[in-house]
Amino acid sequence: MLVNAPRDLPASLLALAPAAVPPPAKATRQSVIAVRRWTDALVSVRVTRDPAFRFTAGHYARLGLAGADGAIATRPLSIASATTDPHLEFVCTLVPDGELSARLASCAPGDDAYVDRASYGFLTVDGLAPGPDLWMLATGTGIAPFLSILREPRVWTSFERIVVVHSVRLAAELAPAAPIDTLARAPSAAPGPARLTYLPVATREPGATVLSSRIPAMLEDGRLAEAAGLPIDVSRSRVMTCGNPAMARDVRRTLAARGFAPVRRNMPGQMIFENYWQDRAGTASAATVPGETTP
């Protein structure tokens, strides 16, 4: 999720960066339906959906809100809702001094919102090579695309086991993932036969969760596999990652050493990563682009 695109991104990625004011031809005017504040710095916003808007679970789109002066601030955000929902839902971190964050903090139902006419992204299950186990590794609001993917019935018939690992600083920040926790506790409510395991992680609140270390460390030393009761093996595991660049880089390094190959254009692989992430200062970073080496 981005606030501002850094100047050193490749031109192909800058083309996806948010503009100060989205061109009318590339956005539709929608309406805020609901806003839920999970913590002082974490909110979910639900907006109406243009009937012509289509997306693949795992994609993102720019969300824009107007300020008092009429200027529109935008940020690409992963879509958390199902592809069949009549609305769009986004999970957002409020960034200090962020233009969109200031508007999100004060927006209310009925306010105008602006959404891209098209969605973007590579973090979909379509590029993964066949395999029985799906691992989803997320930090913070990186859980949003996985919420959308898990709302797709076909995912629950394409895999035998699904493991979601969600790492945050404080336990309260796990709240947006409550639907995943519910499905893990009530398998009969799942839209398909796959077995779901949910592993929440609070790294800065000792005792709040069973696991409390960084995802890469637990991946490397086997604690994730032990907690899930499932080996992470290239022959059967498919791994999707959405989170801060350091986490994505370390996960990629560990998996590559085990023989995992990244999804490339027109070439299936065993691991796939989200392109972008926003750090706590609001700086946009290129995390991992499928088919390229993480910096």
Image: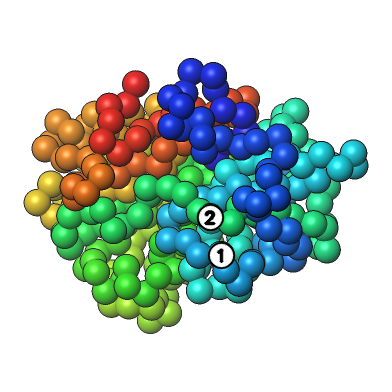
Secondary structure under the numbered disc 1 in the rendered image? loop
Q: Earlier in the sequence, mark 1 or mark 2?
A: 1
Q: Position of residue 163 (x, y in %)?
A: 31, 57
The type of residue carrying mark 2 is Ala
Q: Position of residue 201 (x, y in %)?
A: 44, 44
Task: Count residues near mark 1 (Cα–Cα under 10 Å), then give few for <14, some for 14-19, many for 20+.
Answer: some
Name the residue: 28% across, 77% down: 193
Write the residue at 62% across / 50% down.
Answer: 26
Q: Vertical placement of 167 versus 34: above or below? A: above
Q: Amino acid at mark 1?
A: Phe
Residue at (51% x, 35% y) in the render: 15
Q: Which mark is residue 220?
A: none
135 and 107: which one is in front? 107
Q: Which residue lies most toward the top here?
A: 8
Task: Classify residue 197 by image quadrant.
Answer: bottom left
Q: Is residue 294 visible?
A: yes
The percent coordinates of residue 225 (x first, y second) are: 23, 48
Q: Nearer the viewer, residue 145 or 173?
A: 145
* Residue at 37% in and 47% down: 122
Circle 1 residue: 53
Badge 2 is on which residue?
Answer: 118
The picture quadrant where one finds residue 19 is top right
Quarter holding the C terminus?
top left
Is 100 on the left or on the right of 139, as rendered?
right
